[in-house]
Image (spheres, rainbow, N blue to C red):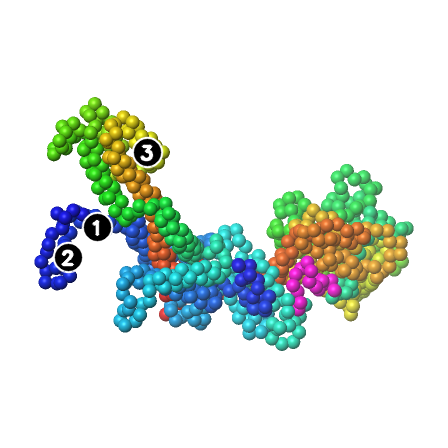
Amino acid sequence: MEPSQVSNVSNDKPNRQKANRFTGNRAYFRKHADWIRQYRWYLAGAATLIPVLVMAGYSVAPNSTSYMHSHGELANPHAAWEHKCDACHKQQSWGEHKGGLLDAESRWHDMTCEKCHQGAAHNANISAAGTDYHNRCSNCHHDHAGRTNSLVRIDDEHCTKCHSDLNTWAKSGKPKCDGMVTNFASKHPDFRPLKETKPTDRTLKFNHGVHMSPGQAYTPNGKEAVTVAKLREWSPALAERYIKPGQAADAVINLTCASCHEQDPGVRNADFNKLRDELSFRGEPTHAVLPVRPAGANFLPIDFEAHCRVCHPLNAPTGAVKAQGNSEQTYMISGFSVPHRRQPDQLERDLGAGYLASLVAQKQPAMKAPPGPGGPLDPLPKFDAGTLRDEVGRLTADARKRLLTPGGNVTINKSEGCAKCHDIKDNKVPQVADRTVWFQAAKFNHLAHRATDCMQCHPGTKAAPHPDFKAEDNYESPSATILGIALCQSCHAPAGTKVKLPDSSQEIRGGGIRYSCVDCHKYHNGDHGLQGRAAAAMLPPPNELLTLPEFLNGRKPKAKE
Amino acid sequence: MGAAYQWLPPLFGVAGWPPSPSSTIGVLLGVALALIVVIEMLILFRKKLRGRKQILGIPLGTTRSWMWVHIWLGLLGIPVVLAHADFRLVSSGLLSLITLWLFLLVIASGIWGLIQQQRLPAKLYAEVPDETIASQIDFVGATHARDAERMAKALVVAPIDSESVQPIVPDNLAHYINDFAAKILVPYLERGGARSPLASPARTEQQFANLRKELPPDASDTLDKLQELAELRRQWDHQEAIQFWLHIWLLFHFPLSALMTVCMVFHAAVALKLNW
C-alpha cells in the first residue's frame, strides 16, 4: 500500500483519529459471493418449490397423484381403481379412526372390501382376537403388489397363524379339525374322508376290479365275459361308447377309467348328444347331470343311465299268464324297461302299470277268449276285471321280488335288479352318498394331474386276478381306492424330497411342486368342492348392487334420505 | 445390521417383529427421524446467528458444538431411517422411496463433505504455501497481470528519467518479450487455466529459459519476477481446484436437505392419512 493511498481523516473518536482511511482500490476487499454459495441457495429454492407444487396438486386432486404414495400396482381384478384410492380406502379425518394417529397401519387398512366381497361368516368358535384378525381382509389379502399378483394366493403364515395352534384361538372346546398344522409337506393330518369313511358307508356295492377286468369276468370260470356282440345286443344305442374301433364281435369289452369317469361331456359332439337324448328319453334331468362344459377339475357324477344301464339294463322280468277261459294255456308277457331312481313302492306301481299295459295291449293273445259255440260271430265274453287285476298283481309281485332280492338274478343282462348294487333295508333303497368330490374341505384338480396314470393314486381300482372274490369285496375301502397324503407329498414338497414309491421300497428324489395351504384350501365358504365362489353367501345383497358408473368409481350408492 | 434387526428380536421372543413402517413403532421411528431432521436443519439458523452467544437469554452454544451435534445426529439417522423403512430400500411408495433415498443421499453428501473438510485444508496448507483469499484469486490475478504488463513494457521502453536512451531489451529483440507477455503470460495471470503453457512447471521453466537465452542479461531480474507471478498463479489455480472440492459437496448437501425435508413433510402427511 502506497502512502498516497492513505489520507488523514478527522473524527471525534480517538481510535478513528489515529487511523488512516484506505483510499485505494477497495474492490480487493469486496466479498465476492462464489458461485457454489450462490447456486446452493438457488437449488435449495427450486428443490423446495418442486415438491410443494406436487403437494398442492395432491391436495387439489389426491387421486391423480396416487402414484406418489401408492405402494405398487393393484392386481388385475382391482386395476380399474388404480388411481381411485377412496374406492377401497375409507376416508378419514384427523380424529376419525380407532387406532389413534400413530396407528397409520390401521388407518390405511380400514377399507370397504365388503362392497363387492361379502364372504361367509367366519368360524363361530373363534376368540375375539381371532375375530378381529379375520375382520380385516387385508391381514391376509395383500394388494399393491403388481398386476399379476394373486390376491388369494396368500402365504402359509396367514393360515398357520391360527392353525398351528388352533386350541389357543378357539373360543371354547376342542376344534373340529386338527389343531397343529404348520406345513403340508411336514405337518399336516391325513385326509379326513379317508380316515372316517367306512366301506359300508357307501351303501352301494361296486367293485372297480371287476369292471376293469377284460370282459368284466373277474373270477375264473365265473360269469361269462361281456363281448362286443353281447353289448350291442343289450343296448344298441349306448354300446358304441365302450367298443374300440375295429373290435371284433367276439372281442371282450375292456373298460377304462374314462369309460365312466368323464371330465368333459363333449358339448355339442355326437357322443354328448346321444347321451343327452338317452337321458332325456329316460326322463333324467340332463342339464343337471351334464353341466355345460365343466372345467374338468372334478369328474362328472356317475349316472346309472349314462354309465351303468348299457350292461345292467333294469328290466321287469318276462312273466307267464293264463289265457282267458283257458287255464291250461299260458302266454308269455315280455319284460320291459323300468326307470331308475325309484323306491320299491314307486317301482311296484311302475311294474303294475307296465304289466297292465302289456296285458291290455291290442292283440295280446292272453286276453283273447277262445272260440266257443257259435263261432266268432258271437259277442265276446265280458272282460273279467278281477282276473286281470290278479294277474297283474301276481306278475308285479314276482317282478318286485326278483328285482329287490339279492341274488335274485341269474345272468348279467336279463334280470338284474336294484339289489345288484343297492343295499335295500326296510323296503327302502338307501340314498347313495355323493362321492363326486371326496375331499370336500379342499380342492383337487384332476385335470392338473392328467399326465399321471390313475392307478398311481387309485391303486385299488385296477384289474387283478381275484380267484376268491367274495360278496364283501363289493364294498371297497376308500383308503384302498384313494391313497392318502403321503402320495401327495411325493410331489407337493420341497424339491429334492426323498419319496418312497407306494408299491416298492425304491426311493426317488421328488417334490418341487407347490405345497402351500391355498393350493388346496380355500376360505370364505369356498372350501366345498361343489360350492365355491359363486355361493349365495359370497354375493353382495341385492339392495347393495352397483350400477356400472358406481362400480367403476368404487362407490356405494348413496343412501336415500 | 438389517439381518440382526430383523432376526434377533424374534429370537428373544419379541412378537410382531419387524414392525412395518406404518405400525405404531414404525410411526414413532418416523417421528424420531423427523425430529432429527429438524435439529439438523437448525444449524442453518445457528450459522446465521454466528457471533451471538445467546438469544432471548438462552445460550446458543458454539457453532462448533452445533456442528458436532449435526454430524452425529445425522449418522444416527441412518439406522433410524432404515428401521423405519423396515430395511426395504426399493419396495415402497414412490414418495416414501424418494424421501428415503434423499435422506441417505443427504447423509452421504454430508459424510463426503466431512471427509473433504478434514483432508483438503492440510493438503492446501502443504501444496499451496502462497495461498490467497479464494474468492479474490481472479482479482489478484488481474492485478498481477497489469503488473506483468508494466514490467514487460519497462524492458522494451527506456524510462523517461533514465540516463540511457536505450531500453534493456533492444528493439530487434522486443518482440520476444512482447509476444510472450501479450499472448501467454498476461492471459494466464488473468484467467489461469490448465491449457496454458505456464500451467506446467516444466514448460514454464522452458519458456523463461528461452527468454533468458534470447534477451540481454539485464532482463533477468524482471524475468525472475514474471516467472514468480506465473508460479503464484499456478498455485492459485491449484488452490481453486482444492477449494472446489472443499465446497462442492454443499451444492448437493444443502439443496438435497431442503428437498428431503419438504418430501418428508409430504410423506408424513400422506402416510398418517391426515384429513384424507
Identify the residue at horizontal 27%, vertical 39% (top origin): B229
The type of residue carrying mark 1 is Phe
Q: Position of residue A257 (x, y in %)?
A: 74, 50
> Which contiguous range is marked in magenta?
A179-195
Tell me whether the residue at label 3 lies in contact with that at label 2, contact meaning CB atoms closer than 8 angstroms: no
Mark 3: which secondary structure?
A: helix
Give the foreground label among 2 and 1.
2
Q: Quadrant of residue B159?
A: top left
Q: Quick check: can you spot residue A353?
A: no
Find residue A29 and name its label. 1
Q: Counting other residues with Cα less than 10 Å from the Cα at mark 2, is it few (<14), some (14-19), or many (20 or more)?
A: some
Find residue A19 and name its label. 2
Q: Position of residue A386 (x, y in %)?
A: 79, 65
Q: Quick check: can you spot residue B119?
A: yes
In the image as oriented, which residue stretches furthest toward the right?
A: A221
Classify residue A138 as left or right of residue A32. Answer: right
Mark 1: which secondary structure?
A: helix
Q: Chain of mark 2?
A: A
Residue A180 painted magenta: yes
Q: Which residue was labeled with disc 3?
A: B204
Q: Are marks 2 and 1 on the same chain?
A: yes
Front-most of residues B77 and A225: B77
Image height check: is A24 above or below A198? above
The type of residue carrying mark 3 is Thr
Identify the residue at horizontal 28%, vertical 69% (top origin): B54
Magenta-drawn stretch, dominant element (helix, strand or loop): loop
Front-most of residues A132 and A279: A132
Q: Position of residue B89 (x, y in %)?
A: 48, 55
Q: Chain of mark 1?
A: A
Residue A272 painted magenta: no
Tell me whether the residue at label 2 lies in contact with that at label 1, contact meaning CB atoms closer than 8 angstroms: no
